[in-house]
Amino acid sequence: MSRVRWTLWLPLVLFAIFCAVVFVQLVHPAGTTVASKMIGKPLPPFQLRAASPDRPGVSTADFQDGKPKLLNIFASWCIPCIAEAPQLAELERQGATIIGVDLRDHPEDLAAFLARNGDPYARIGADDLSVVQLGIGSSGVPETYVIDGKGVIRYQHIGDIRAEEIPFMLEKLKEAGA
Amino acid sequence: MIANFGLAALWLAGALAALQLLAGAFALRGDEPTLARLVRPAAVVQGVLAALSFGALLLLFARTDLSVRLVVENSSSMKPMIFKIAGAWGNHEGSMLLWVTIMSLAGALIALLERRLPEPTMLATLAAQAFVGLGFYAFLLFSSNPFERVANPPPDGYGLNPLLQDIGLAFHPPTLYLGYVGLSVAFSFAVGALVTREVTPDFARAMRPWVLGAWIFLTLGITAGSYWAYYELGWGGWWFWDPVENASLMPWLAATALLHSASVLAARDALRAWTIMLGVIAFSMSMIGTFLVRSGILTSVHAFAVDPERGTFILALLAVYIGGALTLFALRAGTVTEGERFAVTSREAALVVNNVALTSILAIVLVGTLYPLVTEAFGVKVSVGPPYFNPVTAIFFFPMLAVLAIGPLLRWRRDSLGRVRGEVLLVALVAVAALAGARFAGSTRLLPLLGLALAVAVAVAAFLPLRGRSLRRLPLHVWGMVLAHFGIAVSLFGVSVDSAFTKERLIAAQVGETMHVGPWAVTLASVEPVAGPNWTAMEGTLSVSFDGGSPSEMTPQSRNFWEPVQHTSESALLTRWNGQLYAVIGEEAENGGWQLRLWWKPFVTFIWFGGLLIGLGGLLALLGRLSLDLKRRHVRARGAERRAEQAQ
């Protein structure tokens, strides 16, 4: 009767793992400046079809007109992207050109997302197979890249842009434009 | 003065919790049996003191006492009284005080009323309750003192944000807290039973009303929260699998499972260790949920301030309580004797399927909620959404509903499907007919189709347990079960019809233009600027008519707040018995038109009606159980009197 079965310890073990992961997160919040391996390299060649009927899609050539831009990876189904929307709107208001790469999305969901959260995008390309996302070294949504006027990736921001990070992003854009 | 009194009462309540814990523990060890007599009074006085402390906080807010930091930051003399009072718990410190107050009042109630359990189990239960309470007292007193003073009181408070003056928002958190705290009582009972190894039907009966009560509040809280998200976010969606939503759903799933397994334990003395485990899990989910929400380590549409110190404190509490309980479980569960056996076809077996399905769904939601956290540890931020949650939970949810249709018809212990052949056939036929009907009406996607068929079948099956029984003499808790199961069907019907038959239009409409969405004709009559206390808005006036009927008016707004700067869409809703027309107005389009988004959502209101029915069913079950308990206690007391007389 007093035999202790190992399965009874399983919940405790799982809980301990949970606590450990969460504790690490609490003590060392994930840095927002983890660099992609593609920083400093030119964008890989790609061509995305238009995700939205009212504006063109995205290709590598769009980033080579001499003007630095933000490349924002987002999707209508991504909740942090909702939180990020006002910051993108503010960045656009302050003169940033934002090019959207919309991941695995439906056009009607995208339209709803833009109608609800505002629409800061100059162009939106549909990345149905995450080709561009993976190509530029991103593995999550949302992420925002600073691309200089020659199409070279200068900076990667992982996660949603917080309100206090807007000046920093503008600074990065300015650096890329020099 | 009042603040000092509140703080003193809080310290005293904490001291009594310590006394309750120590007295209970020493009495249990047998060192000092007389200490046992201290435990129940300590619990009662602790409850009174905590209530006084919370009362003091309410008074401070009602009077807008600006010498208290919490009042300065969260209130203002210009607020209406109801929001002044609600402001007391609309912040971190106040909500934690509310939590600990409800918890200690629950402890006091148990101490006063619960006489069924053996005294050692009671002592262990109350000691466990005090132990949990003690952590929260420490949290309040050392890290989140609600009575902290300010050196120089400002002329008025800063908390006049009209966005937060919403009556729903004021009462939503306390509702969920009542649920969480009810589960803390179940947790204490589980720990108490583990300590003394007395996992009996009486233990299940003592725990059940608390689980039921908690479950009712959670059900209502989730239903209200879902409706709030639906009309406030302006997306036409009613559930987003957002971490904060999941945080309230997970305890509900665990509590639902616990409710059913406690029934098996109470009626048949089976599933002993499993019920204990669920008691621990249910409260763990409440605490993990609170932790995830309050520590801000998950990004969510519900923004809370990130505070690593408080996050670490709650995590430490979590580790001590849940870790401790799970350790106790691992050590003791093997020694809890196995309960009664039952056959594969039996009421118990059906309830086991329910439990396995619910815990699987719980695990799926938990994994989906925590996954971003795990990947973040490797420097990757991801967001897990409906494409994961919907189909994966459905894998367990749909079979569970199929069993729900039949389970309540089965007998305890051993039964055969042959005996309920007729009913099974009826339900299956109804399901097939509903499937065919939905297919004919034009639904093609798998999940809504299956959902519709099951909803109709379960709606019929929910009432089958009533067959052949005298409706007048049927116990109240059976009515509760019938109603709650019917509520599930109603809710699922709303969900399925909404996702299968919603009609949606997104247009850049010119003023005067008429468009059609489903059976509705919608004319954009005008767009005018309007202004509120701290916002301006463009308000569209829509003239809408259903199927050529007389027109009604709807006025969606696109609002800009300036303090804080925020843009919101105020959706307009028009409700009919068979659905809602949902209208959102967006920005001005380039061609001079306005972005309009219209949804015709047939039967969408059934989602929340179903939720209310489920809650009502829970209430009936609770009343039924409580009145049965009272009768039993009465009979027992009479029996004791008679025995005493005969002995004389």
Image (tube, rainbow, N blue to C red):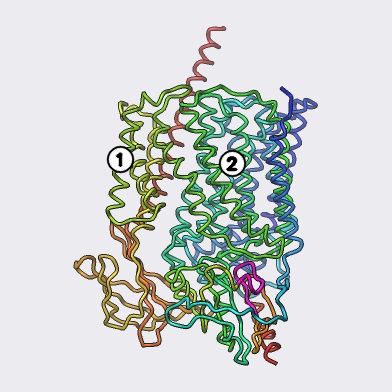
Image x and y of residue B458, in percent: 37, 41
> Where the N terminus of chain B falls, by quadrant?
bottom right
> How many marks overall?
2
Q: Which residue is outermost to the right?
A: B31
Graded by Cα atoms within 10 Å as few (under 14), some (14 to 19) or many (20 or more), the crowding at tag 1 reads many
User: Which residue in the structure is indicated by mark 1?
Assistant: B430
Q: Residue at x 45, y 61 (%)?
A: B228
> How packed is label 2: few (under 14 Cα within 10 Å), some, or many (20 or more)?
many
Taking B591 as reference, is B149 left or right?
right
Q: Residue B561: x and y, percent?
A: 50, 78
| Residue bounds of the magenta highlight | A133-145
Task: Residue A142: give x, y in percent of width and height.
Answer: 60, 70
Q: Which mark is residue B106?
A: 2
Task: Look at 60% across and 91% down and name the residue there.
Answer: A65
Frontmost of labels 2 and 1 is: 1
Magenta stretch contains residue A135: yes
Residue B393 is at least partly visible in this image: yes
Is residue B483 found left or right of B389 in the rendered image?
left
Q: Residue at x 55, y 67 (%)?
A: A129
The answer to whether residue B1 shows anywhere in this view is no
The answer to whether residue A135 is left or right of residue B473 is right
Say what secondary structure mark 2 lies in. helix
